[in-house]
Amino acid sequence: MALPNPGFWPLNKPVIVSEEALVAPVLVPDLTTPAAAKAAAATGPAYVVLVGISLSHFLNDTMQSLIASVYPILKDNYALDFAQIGMITLAFQFTASLLQPVIGHFTDRKAQPFSLAIGMGFTFFGLLLLSVAQQYPVILIAAALVGLGSAVFHPESARIARLASGGRYGFAQSVFQLGGSFGTSMGPLLAALIVVPFGQPSIAWFSSIAFLAIIILWRIGLWYRPQITTKKTLPPSHPDAPNSRRVKVALVVLVALLFSKQLYVSSLSSYYIFYLIEKFQVSTQAAQLYLFLFLAANAAGAFFGGSLGDRFGRKYVLWFSILGALPFTLALPYAGLFASAVLTVIIGLIISSATSSIIVFAQELVPHRFGMISGVFFGFAFGIGGVGAAVLGRVADHTGLEFVYQVCAFLPAIGLLAVFLPKMPKAAR
């Protein structure tokens, strides 16, 4: 069947795609061999697609971050305790965590070019429901719907970023992550400027962002559709690639590194506002601005981390990004207000630089299960954030938030496990 030119966004020339291609197994080309990597680099990244998928990630995560940003409003309106706040995070992130690997495995076997636009529809309805929710169970359902949209979005969008990378995998993943990180940082700012003054119903205004994202993702689906390959045989692996045992060990190490990073970031994202209000008696709006600084630093660190991994090797970036944050996380619980702001910016810059390298490292270890491995790691990140938020909320109710941050300060020490990561072939790193 013939695909028309997308019109106002000409991502692709008219092509002919058979119906069989749309149900064939989806394989991301193995570019670990030097010749294949050189050929991919010669084509260069598809910048329009990368910008489009990054912008979609920005819109997606902006809407998702609103959930944590309106916690003070929900807490006051419905007299919630910290454990119930943690359960809202769990409802959102547990849905995404469970479904992302399943969706990634399914799309490895059968391409779904327009699944991203459909998934964004769940986020659209979740926001509308959250804006009118008057009971705690309804709030949990709304959060779960937004999580479902995230589960559909992340595995396929990561695949599209790699397809559009032109061989610069870390750079492409960084551009993709940059949109998501800045979207996450915008949540507290928008909450301070819009949701706090106008209340819970104003969350419905952000459904227009979801509608814009649906349009963009539909156009990206038109570009992605003819990229689907009918290739059914796996390409040969690089002769210097690690064996299956080393791959399994490396995946466990990467999961541990992601655990340390994501649990610490979750502790700040979910409870930093309350920590600042409780310890320094700042206003809710001021605390949200401080959270914005941390999340914006996360965005910047995620962007530069991928490019540094392309140039120097992802293993070195992982060493620096996880373990390098340790001195600053240890100092944070004992710092004043201004010093806390400075430390969280430094922590955000350093610790978030691991994100792209962890994802790309895992993808290169298991290139024939690209969607599933992307879903596992994105899903694990959400799952750890959700479970961690719930557990930390329970601990905070009994011991106080300051104790929580004293304990979480040691999490980056898990970065020492990076010593067990294998050396990847130069063309694949």
Image (cartoon, helix red, strand yellow):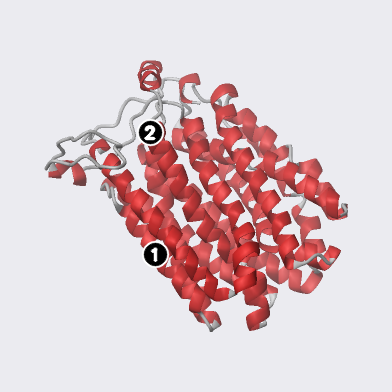
Q: Position of residue 342 (x, y in %)?
A: 79, 45
Q: Which residue is mark 2?
A: 164
Q: Residues within 10 Å of mark 2 (few under 14, many from 20)?
A: many
Compare residues 336 and 388 and report the one nearer the observer. Answer: 336
Compare residues 165 and 249 and report the one nearer the observer. Answer: 165
**Mark-to-mark CA distance, 1 and 2:** 26 Å
Q: Which residue is mark 1?
A: 122
Query: Residue placed at 66% from the left, 58% from the top?
Result: 269
**Residue type indicated by callout 2:** Ala
The quarter of the picture where residue 408 lies is bottom right
Residue 181's tag is none
Query: Residue placed at 57% from the left, 47% from the top?
Result: 181
**Depicted 81 relative to depicted 265: above or below:** below
Compare residues 398 and 227 and report the one nearer the observer. Answer: 227
Among numbered discs 1 and 2, the one appearing first in the sequence? 1
Query: Residue placed at 48% from the left, 70% from the top?
Result: 204
Q: Quadrant of the N terminus?
A: top left
Discs 1, 2 touching: Cβ within 8 Å: no
| Left-right relation of 375 to 190 | left
Q: Position of residue 289 (x, y in %)?
A: 71, 56
* Residue 101 visible from this viewpoint: no
* Residue 412 visible from this viewpoint: yes
Label 2, secondary structure: give it. Answer: loop
Q: Residues within 10 Å of mark 1 (few under 14, many from 20)?
A: many
**Depicted 282 relative to depicted 365: above or below:** below
Q: Position of residue 125 (x, y in %)?
A: 41, 69
